[in-house]
Image (spheres, grey):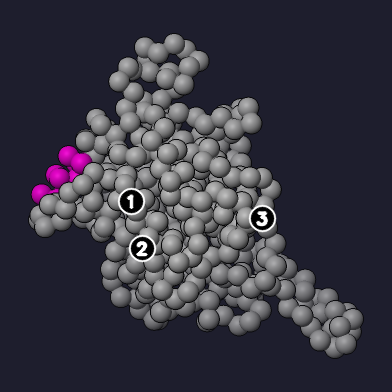
Amino acid sequence: MLQGGGSLGAYHLGVYQALAEKSLHPHWVSGISIGAFTAALLAGNRPERRVERLEEFWREISWPGEWGSWLPVQWRKMANMASHATSLLFGQPNFFAPRWVSPMLAPPGTTDALSFYTTAPMRSTLRRLVDFEYINSRATRLSLGAARLRDGELVFFDNTREPIGPEHVLASGSLPPAFPPTRINGELYWDGGCVSNTPLNAIFEAPPERDTIIFMIDLFDKAGPEPRGMDDVNWRAKSIQFASRTSHHIAQMARVHNMSQRLERERGGAASFANGGRRERPPRRDIVHLVYKRGADQTGDSDAEFSRWSIEERRQDGYRDMKRVLELAPWKRAPSNDMAAASFSGSGHQADESDMLVHTADSERQEISSHLHV
């Protein structure tokens, strides 16, 4: 599950690269906003081409230049601010471009009146890098979250229920007021992050058919220090707004799982008799929740800062963090009938084995995720 977060989404590339090296290819990907773009690139390409396509995507939507990577932290922060200003003024290649006439001056009801930028370049980019025929072959299940303007409901477009095209990906990333809403079958849609920035419902509400590991990759962290200036205020406000209630949803899922396990035990005698003395356990779902931590050189507008050096740094962070998660493999720590849920905070520090907490179906704890630094 891939959270939205603009240019922070380069973290997804590193995460997937680490998974692919272990031949861990998802059979279902779900995303919102930039997470939907990543999800479409994964589901819309064969496994052996996915990393290459993700690399191409981030290379195409960023301005060339590597010079900022060697600057001291404070100077890099200034360079990142300049990079963000460039994005505001000129857009990003192959992604979005500014409307040179203000939407305030455009005729009401027209597309030009509904956003500051056009995302027409991204439609072409998606057609070039994503094989939508392959998506609709359903080799990998794909779910994309978008907010329906008419009633504010979070809707998931799913390739098991309908054909998916570039418009569905764009709808999930149509963040107002920067980008215009996307019309699909007569309905207008905005970025799914307007309702919830984490695509939890699509997967959590579907009963598992087999043992499943769910990797939840978040780009905003609800926890953070007190702000010391307006730049910090900007970032903390975004983080709280877009982090969604991930921990709450994981806890809710654990309670449902625990209840089903309890019911299974209570009717175990009858089930064992019906199966000739054999008890068949239900499929289990284990959750790995990984949260991106931005570096000291990042700004309050890091989610809209597309410099090549920042994108590469986020990619490396994702790769390093997921490699460490795979080494710890928390899903291997729980008994076969229980659900393991662990939250990892990417920060570059080694994990302390004693901090690992595996939450089981018998646990009465309400808080079901521990924070590790990977």
Measured as percent of width and height from the top left, residue 46 is found at 50, 62
Which of 357/83 is in front?
Answer: 83
Report which residue position mark 2 lands on. 14
Report which residue position mark 3 lands on. 205
Which of 313/274 is in front?
Answer: 313
Label 3 to label 2, Cα distance in Å? Answer: 28 Å
> Which mark is nearer the camera, 2 or 1?
1
Earlier residue among tags 3 and 1: 1
**Vertical order, 312 against 257 (above or below):** above
> Which mark is nearer the camera, 3 or 2?
2
Measured as percent of width and height from the top left, residue 152 is found at 58, 33
Measured as percent of width and height from the top left, residue 149 is found at 57, 29
Numbered mark located on residue 229 in the image? none
Q: Is residue 144 visible?
A: yes
Which of 321/13 is in front?
Answer: 13
> Which mark is nearer the camera, 3 or 1?
1
In the displayed structure image, the side of residue 303 where residue 252 appears, left or right: right
Viewport quadrant of the C terminus: bottom left
Residue at x 32% of width, y 69% of height: 320
Residue at x 39% of width, y 66% of height: 17
- Magenta residues span 74-83
Residue at x 90% of width, y 81% of height: 274
Q: What is the three-letter code of the residue carrying label 2?
A: Gly
Is residue 78 rendered magenta in the image? yes
- Secondary structure, mark 3, is loop
Report which residue position mark 1 lands on. 58
